Structure formats: C-alpha cells, structure tokens
Image (cartoon, rainbow, N blue to C red):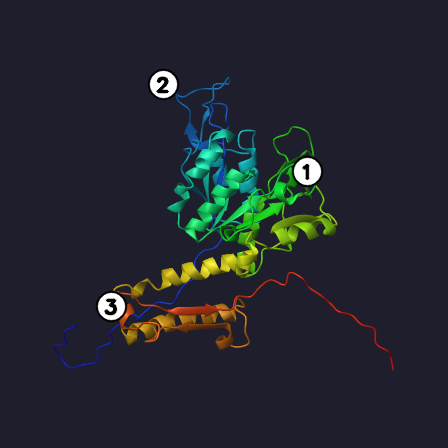
Amino acid sequence: MPQYLSPGVYVEYVPPASLPIAGVATSVAGFIGVVADNDDFKMPDQPGQFQTDNEGNPVLDDEGNPVPAPYKLATAGEPTLITSWEEFKTKFGDFQEGNKILAHAVYGFFFNGGSRCYVLRVAAATDIDDNLVELEKFETEDEITIVAVPGAISQTQHTAIIAHCAKMGDRVAILDGDADDKKPVDVDVIRPVGRSQQASYAAIYYPWIKVFDPVSNAPDTTIIIPPSGHLAGIYARNDATRGVFKAPANEVIVNALDVSRPISKAQQDGLNPEGINVIRSFKGTIKVWGARTMADDANADFRYVSTRRYFNYLQESIDDGTQFAVFEPNNLALWQRIKRTVGDFLLNEWRDGALFGETPEQAFFVKCDAETNPKEVRELGQVVALIGVAIVKPAEFVIFRIQQTAGE
C-alpha cells in the first residue's frame, strides 16, 4: 500500500481485475516442401555483399566486377518464418525446378491474401515422409493454425498430417486430392484417408489448378500445381475480410488460370457428401465450391471448415485470455471475473455475426458458480466454467421455392 504523509487528494492507477480476451490469430500457415540442396540452386543476389575466395579476396566476373554474394539457403528441417514473397526468395530462391511446387504454393498463399507463414524445407521428395513424422518441429510454433504439404497425396502422408493437427487441437490441415486428371472421379482415389473424428481437423480439395509457369522459356506456358497453398491464402483473406466463422468457399482463387480437369455438378454430387471440396471453373473464373471437413457422420457438429476453425479460435482465445485465473483464490469473486471476461468476449463475437441468435442469451451462455464448482471440485484445485455457443453454419444449399399464382 502507498504511504500518505500529508493531507491532499491522491489519484492512483488501479489495474483492471482482468483484461479483455483478444482473439488469437487464425491464418498463419505452416508449409513443408522440397527445396533442392545443391550448388546449382539459384539464390537472388544479396545487395551490397560480394563473393570472396578462400583467401578473402573478392571474386570477379569476366569484366572485372565483383560478383554479388547470394543469400544463404535456409537450413533444412527447421521452420523459418516468412512474411512476404520477396522474403521467401531470399531464403528459398525464386521459381526453379528445385523448388517449384513449394514456391508456387507460398506464392499462391501470399497472392491470395496470406501474410505470415512458416516454411520447413526438405532437400528431396524422398525426404517428405520422414519430415512428416518431424512435424513435431511445428508443435513449438504456437502461431500456426493451418498446415499444408503441397503435393502430398498418399495415404501415409495424409494420415500423418491429420494426426498432427488433431493432436495439437488448434490447427487444421489443407490436403491436396489426387493429381492425376486422367482417372475417373473416384472417392477412394481422390481421398485416400477415410472420414473420421480426427479428420474433422482436415479439409481436402480437388482437382489441382493451372497457373503460369515462370520456369519455362516458352511464352504462356502453364503448369499444374496442388491447390493447398492458394487455399491457405484464401483462408487468410476470408478471415481478414469476413471472419473465421465465414466458410472459405465461393471464393475466387487468384492467379489460377484453370483447373486440371473440369468437374460437373453431377460429379460433385458424389464428392461433396464424402467431404471432398471441389474447385470448379465458372465461365473462366476459378472458385472454391466446397466448405466441408473430412468429419464422419458421428461428428457432424464439425462438418464444416468454418465450424472447426472457429471452434479452434474460441478455444485458443479463451485459453490465452483467462490465464489470470491460475492460482487465484477459488471463490465467488473469481467465478464472477471468469463469467464477465468470457461473457464480454462472446458478446463481441455475437455482435460480429459469429454466433446464432436474436439475443445474446440465445447465442451463448457462461456458467461458473457453486453448481459447477462444488466442494469436491474446489478441493482438487479446479475451477470449472461451462460455456455454450451457437456457431453459425454456412448456407451450403440455397433453395428458392417458386410457385405460380393467379393474377387478379
């Protein structure tokens, strides 16, 4: 307590009992991909720095000018934070044969609205499966909320990515469907892993997309690439413009020129119920035309990507925003602080349109009282709060019923 020695008015700052809950970031991606580890890999020049020989002398070109030093290639097997396409080029090089799948994915991420991602490079395609088992490297990066391994389409690979996201519980996987556009539309080929509770942490997209190929010397040459990097950017764009509660669908894939194979409505009728999100061309505009996770029927509460991601967002935000309660006296005052803090956060979410209901009472509730915290619970050092939320679901099927009426 401060000491007062003479008469007067004293104004003091009193910190709030608890700070408002701030929503956590939802659109930081984690990519794993191949960047060749060899001397021929081309890196951009490093401004103001020049190559030197073993004796420290500058290396000169044929005209006697110092040769600029290239940026150092990022270490394999270590996640590297990237905040722009230009920064990616300084760590992993521009488009070239040794990195083209990963480079296109990261370029598509930033071009479609992404702003932050972690990139873990492997030196060869044969190393991908081993690094999917070191996904553990992503476990320490708490920012990551989206995981993608562009071009990974095998059962083993999908299983590993899904298991990682389900284990972490705060991120989702964006999976690429089968790449071969010559095969018939076959669910088991496109989606090698079945639907399940774990798979509610994953969304799969099909078919692949066509983009301009900057590596080829021929003009107007296209390349077929996996869509997961572009989709991660769409997730980020959607989160920024609408909110994580809005399904990342009916969205244009910027930079996509076409799809690897056209999918008709009749064909999608067999894919959508199986949790396969189709990418379709509508009069030349390439759009994401699906919004489902790979949850099975027993876990239909998480059928939609937006529901899974929004629930992850709520969990992380409430977890981060209520750390003040740890080791506080477990009494009525603490219960009221928890109710007020969580309630205010959910009230703002309802006002933003994330929760369903005409009134806050219809949209959510927070219960933390003697009923949820009887003596036996308190004796264990626990404080229990019960939270219920009515999350909005996407209007996947918009139906207009038209009838003809007789005029007067």
Residues at circles 2 and 3 in contact by the CB criterion of under 8 Å:
no
Q: Quadrant of residue 297?
A: bottom right
Residue under pointer 3: 379
Q: State which mark lies toward you, 3 or 1.
A: 3
Mark 2 neighbour class, 10 Å CA radius: few under 14, some 14 to 19, many 20 or more = few
Residue 219 placement, left or right of 335: right
75 w.r.t. 345: above or below: above
Quick one: 406 or 93, which is closer to the camera? 406
Q: State which mark lies toward you, 1 or 2.
A: 1
Q: Quadrant of residue 81?
A: top left
Q: Residue at x 62, y 43 (%)?
A: 188
Residue 129: x %, y % from top left: 48, 35
Q: Earlier in the sequence, mark 3 or mark 1?
A: 1
Query: In whole angstroms, how far apart are the C-alphas of marks 3 and 1?
Result: 61 Å
Mark 3 neighbour class, 10 Å CA radius: few under 14, some 14 to 19, many 20 or more = few
Q: Residue at x 68, y 33 (%)?
A: 221
Residue 389: x %, y % from top left: 48, 68
Q: Amino acid at mark 1?
A: Asp
Q: Earlier in the sequence, mark 1 or mark 2?
A: 2
Residue 213: x %, y % from top left: 63, 34
Q: Residue at x 13, y 79 (%)?
A: 6
Residue under pointer 2: 54
Quick one: 365 or 271, which is closer to the camera? 271
Residue under pointer 1: 181
SS at badge 1 = loop
Q: State which mark lies toward you, 2 or 3.
A: 3
Q: Residue at x 41, y 30 (%)?
A: 49
Q: Earlier in the sequence, mark 2 or mark 3?
A: 2
Q: Amino acid at mark 3?
A: Glu
177 w.r.t. 67: above or below: below
SS at badge 2 = loop
4 w.r.t. 311: above or below: below
